[in-house]
């Protein structure tokens, strides 16, 4: 019951927003490209490129927008498909729009938040993430628009306390995840659909 009441209050607040601002809900789908990481043992790991899905809820006002962006990416290490990695981004974002034609606009923005990384070989953890994004937005009728976007996310990976190693005496000590202050760079190329109300 409390959830229903909260949802009703939030909906009422969004509908009664001032006329100079509106709310946009955007759905994204695309491809995530990840840079390789070097472990403290000198090993290089690359996360295989794979698809992502995302959603954002933003307030649009006077050629700007700001809001929350959530993205899910499920991948694996290229060297070992058995080692799965899920990345969930929750970012506060803000962008500025510039018109190109009557219906076409470009935008550039910045983001700040967290990357929640879950693997099947060490404990899950949350890391600081930030980055930039650019995009194109084409207005259709009825509050709908379509667009494309390129997003760069830099995650500070500092996982020095969590180690997953092969302790087999017949092989070299082989740690699968042990980073000291490294940065995971990811690039998301997306197509998106926005509904503004």
Image (cartoon, rainbow, N blue to C red):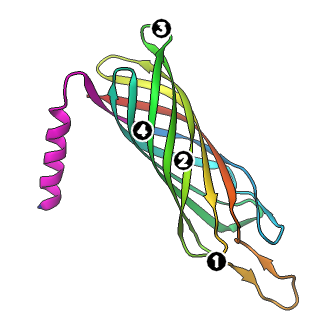
- Rendering coords of residue 188 (x, y %): 59, 41
With 165 as the anchor, is 69 left or right in this view? Answer: left
Give the number of the mark in front: 4 or 1. 1
Count the labels in the image. Answer: 4
Q: CA distance from mark 2 to mark 3?
A: 30 Å
Q: CA distance from mark 4 to mark 1?
A: 36 Å
Earlier in the chain: of badge 2 and badge 1, it is 2
Badge 2 density bin: few <14, some 14–19, many ≥20, Cα 10 Å: many
- The quarter of the image holding the C terminus is top left
Give the SS element for disc 3.
Answer: loop
Residue, disc 4: 27
Please give the range of residues in magenta.
2-26
Membership of 152 in magenta stretch: no
Q: Label 3: which residue?
A: 101
C-alpha distance separating marks 4 and 2: 11 Å
The picture quadrant where one finds residue 187 is top right
Q: Is residue 51 above or below residue 38?
A: above
Mark 2: which secondary structure? strand
In this rendering, the answer to whether 84 lies above or below 67 is: below
Residue located 70% across and 67% down the image = 179
User: As rendered, which of 62 and 145 lies closer to the eye?
Assistant: 62
Give the Cα distance between marks 2 and 1.
29 Å
- Give the image location of residue 191, x and y in percent: 52, 32
* Among numbered discs 4 and 1, the one appearing first in the sequence: 4
Identify the residue under disc 2.
Answer: 52
**Are the two marked residues, 2 and 1, in contact with CB atoms closer than 8 angstroms?**
no
Where on the picture, by quarter, is residue 75?
Answer: bottom right
Q: Earlier in the sequence, mark 4 or mark 3?
A: 4
Question: Which of the numbered marks, if any, corresponds to residue 161?
Answer: 1
């Amino acid at each position: 019951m409390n959830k229903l009441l909260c949802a009703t209050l939030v909906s009422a607040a969004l509908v009664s927003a001032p006329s100079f601002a509106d709310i946009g809900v955007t759905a994204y789908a695309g491809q995530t490209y990840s840079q390789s990481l070097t472990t403290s043992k000198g090993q290089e790991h690359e996360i295989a490129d794979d698809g992502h899905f995302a959603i954002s809820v933003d307030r649009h006002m006077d050629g700007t927008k700001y809001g929350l962006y959530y993205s899910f990416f499920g991948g694996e290490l290229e060297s070992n498909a058995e080692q799965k990695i899920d990345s969930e981004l929750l970012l506060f974002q803000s962008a500025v729009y510039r018109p190109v034609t009557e219906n076409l606009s470009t935008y550039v923005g910045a983001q700040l938040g967290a990357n929640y990384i879950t693997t099947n070989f060490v404990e899950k953890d949350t890391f600081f993430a930030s980055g930039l994004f650019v995009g194109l937005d084409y207005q259709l009728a009825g509050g709908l628009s379509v667009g494309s976007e390129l997003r760069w996310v830099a995650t500070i990976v500092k996982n020095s306390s969590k180690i997953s190693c092969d302790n087999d005496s017949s092989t070299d000590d082989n740690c699968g995840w042990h980073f000291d202050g490294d940065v995971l760079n990811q690039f998301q190329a997306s197509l998106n659909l926005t509904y503004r109300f």
